[in-house]
Amino acid sequence: THCILLGAPVDEGQRRPGCLMGPAAYRVAGIADTLATLGHSVEDRGDVTPAPPGQESCDNPAIHHLPEIVSWTNALREATSTALSDGMPIIMGGDHSLALGSVAGVAAHAASISRPQFVIWLDAHSDFHSIQTTTSGNLHGTPMAYANGRPGFAPLPPFPNPIPGGNICMFGIRSVDPAEYSAMQETDIMVNDMRVLDEQGIAAPLSAFLDRVAAANGMLHVSLDVDFLDPSIAPAVGTTVPGGTTFREAHLVMELLHESNLVTSLDLVELNPFLDDRGRTAKLMVDLVGSLMGRKVFDRPTRSY
Ligand code: DIR
Ligand code: MN
Ligand code: MN
């Protein structure tokens, strides 16, 4: 695979400064070498630069840094769709508001080649607010609703070719606000919250979704939020939620995604290196990228008995 690294040092989608250091941390943690060692070609296109922010406003007074996020969305949509013509974009965040742009970019590209777009959202949160419904005002809590074509996103441009709920699968969910919950009730998004993982494990629900992607010849975008992981193994995130996925569950997700051969783009979001413990969260995220891209080291027999 030709892997295209795009740095997206977005920090304005939440209020805990530090995510802007994420792209640098992934580079220091060896993301390019990890991919090259697995036999992939790697092209680092550097950090995306947004246009200077404009004057956009909205009638929700809680909203934080809207003009900056509009600029990031436009720049990341273009960078991601361009990269997808050349290889597999890996968008190194940056907070999760970057997915307003990256997912718009992949959806626009998929529409241009008449393939359906699918998304797997690995996160403690559903990120299903609109600009109108968010009470925190943090736009990192909105990209999944934007991608699903929900109303309430002016002044962002309309999402290109909204992704139907049936093409969206969430894993790891354990923090959903009331307005997100009621909006999701109107969709057929496959929501695998932690209770589903406790009762059914990773493999069965994930395979059911991947079968749908394969049957539709879909493109699959993976959006990996650091808080998908349990805070005990991934402390470098501003919005820790207890009860996340374990090291082994997370690697299993990545290995199954690799074996499916369906993944066409990836976001790495919410890493806040300022909160990290000697780079361990950055290194874990890079190791997960390794599993997603074909590394197999976890008690996989290399011969049969
Ligand atoms: C909360 C937290 N639902 C909000 N969201 C996220 O502010 O809207 N935290 N995405 O990571
Ligand atoms: Mn998120
Ligand atoms: Mn989250």
Image (cartoon, rainbow, N blue to C red):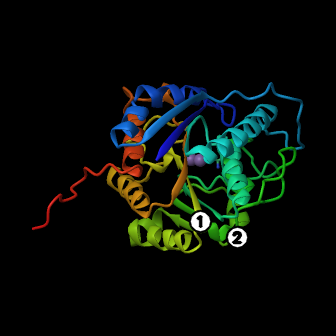
Nearer to us of marks 1 and 2 is 1
Counting labels gives 2
Which residue occupies 41% across, 51% down? 292
The relative height of residue 273 versus residue 61 in the rendered view (above or below) is above
Q: Position of residue 97 (x, y in %)?
A: 67, 42
Q: Earlier in the sequence, mark 1 or mark 2?
A: 2
267 displayed left or right of 301: right
Q: Is residue 201 visible?
A: no
Give the residue type at disc 2: Thr
How far is mark 1 from mark 2, CA to CA? 20 Å
* Quadrant (top left, top right, bottom left, bottom right) of the C terminus: bottom left
Give the residue type at disc 1: Gly
Q: Position of residue 47 (x, y in %)?
A: 61, 27
Q: Which mark is residue 218?
A: 1
Q: Which mark is residue 187?
A: 2
Q: Which sits in the foreground, 180 or 120? A: 120
